[in-house]
Structure formats: C-alpha cells, structure tokens
Amino acid sequence: MPAQGKRRRHEAVVKWAKGELGVHEEPLGSNRGTRVEFYQAHDWLPGGGYPWCASFVDTAWEVGGKRKLPFPSAGAWDLGNRARAAGWAVTSAKQLVAGDFVTFKAGAGHVAIFLAYRNGLVETIDGNVDNAVELRSRPLSTVRDLIHVPELPVAVPPKTTKPPVFEVVTDEKGGKVIYVSGTLAVSRFINRFLRRHPETPIRIRKKRR
C-alpha cells in the first residue's frame, strides 16, 4: 500500500490538472488546439492531432508534478502496461492516492488522473472526454489498471523499443493524414475511416519517427 506522509508531487499533479478543467479542442473533434498540442508535446509520439488522454496524464506529471514519467506514452493501455512492468500497479482502488492514474477498458483505451474512490465509483480528471478536460465518475468495473506513481524517483526497467506508429492517409501518394496511432487503435477504427471516405482510397503506412 502507498506510504502515508508527504505527497507533494501528487498534490501538485492534482492542483495542475484542476487548473486545466475546461480546456477543449479547437475546433472540437480535431484532437488539436493550442493547449491540446501543448499536452501532446509531452509524450514521445511526434506531431499532433491524435487522441490525447495519455498526453494529458504525461503533462500533469511532468509540468504539474515536476517529475517526467519514465515512459511518456501517447497510448492509454500502453501507459498502463509500462507502469505494470515497472511494478506500479496495485490491486485495490483504496490503495491509490489523488494524483495517481487509472486506465479504462472503453474503446481503444482511456487513462485519467485519479482523484478518489467513493461509493463504488472512481472519480477522475480526464483529458479528451467530450473533446475537453473534465471531471468524471465511473464504476470500478470499468477500470483496467490501477497505477500508483511513486512519489520519489525509482528504478524502472530499461526503456524498450517504442511500439510502431501508423498513419491512415486518404490516397496512395500520401494525401491527407487523417489518423495517427498504434496498431490496435488503427485496426479498431479502420471501418469508421472507410465509412467517412467511401469514394477515396485509404492507405495505412508506418510512420517515420
């Protein structure tokens, strides 16, 4: 169970995240905007315009908590997997403290800053919900990973090779990039891209880093 006592970094993460409430995409639905792209600049995925819930968590710790996570992934489940590999996962929501993070099972994955666990609900501050930074409460049953971030720096496994990133573009010559993400997310959403562009060839290519 997390040690009691001073949690200055966790408290700073929560304070910073609360100060971001109301930030939204510009335009809505674009995964872009001055502040959104600021968050995206704090993960290790180049560029912008992609889902940013993990980017928000990365930024909360690097900017708010003044401690960069050793694996600032742009993927929610990838962030959870790497935290598990580092030994940061706990088995009960009661073991978390405000400022930790949790991942959720929905869609291609989601991650948010943990605030509290009350009456069977996990309360969080989320980036990229309804295109904005907002407060949320969800049943514990929707949670995939419960991650307690150590207050002090600790040793983590050596950095592994970054997972491949793919771009979905609107023609074979490169055209307009309409989505950037990992293999799992691209495979989940490919039917959506085809419906949106029924008359346009769609190409998936590995993104150069």
Image (cartoon, rainbow, N blue to C red):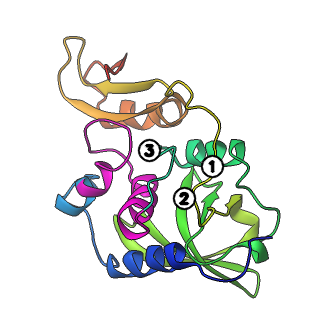
Q: Residue furthest top?
A: 173
Mark 1 = which residue?
80
Q: Amino acid at mark 2?
A: Val
Is there a contact, CB below 8 Å, between mark 2 and mark 3? no
Front residue of 154/54: it is: 154
- On the rendered image, what quadrant is the N terminus found in? bottom right
Q: Residue furthest bottom?
A: 119
Residue 87 image offset from top left, x and y in percent: 74, 49
Mark 3 = which residue?
74
Front residue of 8/112: it is: 8
Mark 2 = which residue?
111
Front residue of 86/105: it is: 86
The quadrant holding residue 206 is top left
Residue 191 in magenta?
A: no
Magenta residues span 38-66
Answer whether residue 179 is visible to the viewer in this image: yes
